[in-house]
Amino acid sequence: MTAKRMTRREFLGFAAGLVGGAALAACAPPAGAPAPTGKEEKPTEAPEVTVLTTAHAWDIVFLEHQKKFDNMFMERHPDIQIKVTNNTWSEHNTIVPTWAAAGTLPDIIYVHGRYAFPWNFEGILVSVQNYVDSDEEFNVEGIWEEALRLYRFKGEQYEIPYDHGPIILGYNKDLFDEAGLPYPDETWTMDDLLENAKKLTKEGQWGWGGYYGTIVGLGNEQSEAILGPWEGRSFNDDDTKILLDMPESIEALQWWTDLIHVHKVAPTPAESQAVPAGIWVAGVAAMFALASWGTPQLHELASFEWDVAPWPKGPKVRRTGSFGSGYGITRDCEHPDVAWTYMREYLSVEGMEFMWGESGRGSPARKAAYQSWIESDPAPDHAEYYLDALENYAVTGHPYQTLAGGEIMDIFNRYTGLIQSGDMSVEEAVQRIIDEGTPVLDEAYKKLIESG
């Protein structure tokens, strides 16, 4: 099994070959016709084929792009056949544990950062550290550390990220133009965001639209974007203690809550839910938090001009959250060396450029592949601000190192929902979160320690 990495030229060559092959087929001699060589040729033995199964969570359109990569890979490796299973994102995360229980896991599966730690703990995936250590050409150091840390378990690399994106500031250029206001830029602070949000709010329009319509959210990347500028935190480093009662965290949560109930520049949950498409996509929010993976949706659906700017600096620092997704080899894989042959090409610089960079799907986890996304058609005009965030002030959002991540997120969402609706104060909600969440975290940590 060859371990040579596919170069960019080979990618382009195979892509062209897949198209050109169809045309050449029309000129081929009819089936059964003698070969026009003038001499008898010895039959060649077909290579022994290894079937490699993969599981993705793509939409139908992007699945076709996935198939293009797989066809190129199989052209390059005629001894490997790729068989694909595809589900929606939510279906995939539900079915993986079912596959694991039945012993029918595909060889390679998609792993969102939120599920990596519990799935690794359950032994659903296996460490690829030996491949990372021995395969110098793969160059894992070319992947951002903030992306890799999501997929380490007990000191070893279990999965490899393909994308890792930060939250920065998105804005509706049409609404800024209509109000005669200059666009956000590198000098903006949170005070600037508030001042402009007031000017851009009117009947049926809000200055601030939040993150997918959520104004006060504490999940993963959003928690760092919300709390980080005040140097607040949601958890300690190893996700064993909730830190929302820090003065900095309370101050940050109150600031964002006041956008709804004091300044009235952001929608209540009911107002946000009244716009099914999402207020940011519908064009009734002048500014909003936008992760890199949200840009294809805006490119496809928005009927207005939009762009991005750096996440505004807070009272203490400029900081935002980031998160990502990756792929790993499962415990049911009978041919891990073959699986790594696929993984190393899929997640190489060239693989990331083809799959996620040039397609505009999202920000690649390798810096060397990032320019291809910045230059892609779906990327915003100032997409380089995402790269600046990754390199200078984005951090991976907690929690991602606990077995209680799902339960904790449910608790967070329940009480932040009450904050946003105005039914509970920030201080009371934080205390309720700590009272309910601490025993859950403690139990999860105890289970982890007992497992060794």
Image (spheres, helix red, strand yellow):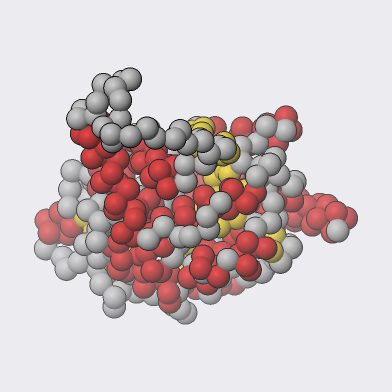
Q: Residue furthest right?
A: 450
Residue 232 is left or right of residue 238, and the answer is left
Residue 109 is left or right of residue 271, and the answer is right
Q: Quadrant of residue 25?
A: top left
Residue 35's place in the image compared with 171, above or below, is above
The residue depicted at 30 percent of the width and 40 percent of the height is 18
Residue 451: percent from left, percent from top: 85, 54
The residue depicted at 38 percent of the width and 69 percent of the height is 368
Residue 341: percent from left, percent from top: 54, 52
Res 345 visible? yes
Residue 162 vs residue 337, the one in the foreground: 337
The residue depicted at 19 percent of the width and 30 percent of the height is 27
Residue 26 vs residue 33, the one in the foreground: 33
Residue 319 is left or right of residue 124, and the answer is left
Residue 229's place in the image compared with 173, above or below, is below
All told, the count of numbered labels is: 0
Residue 230: percent from left, percent from top: 50, 73
Residue 29 is left or right of residue 420, and the answer is left
Q: Quadrant of residue 265?
A: bottom left
* Quadrant placement of the C terminus: bottom right
Q: Residue furthest front?
A: 39
Res 395 visible? no
The residue depicted at 22 percent of the width and 50 percent of the height is 202
Residue 162: percent from left, percent from top: 47, 56
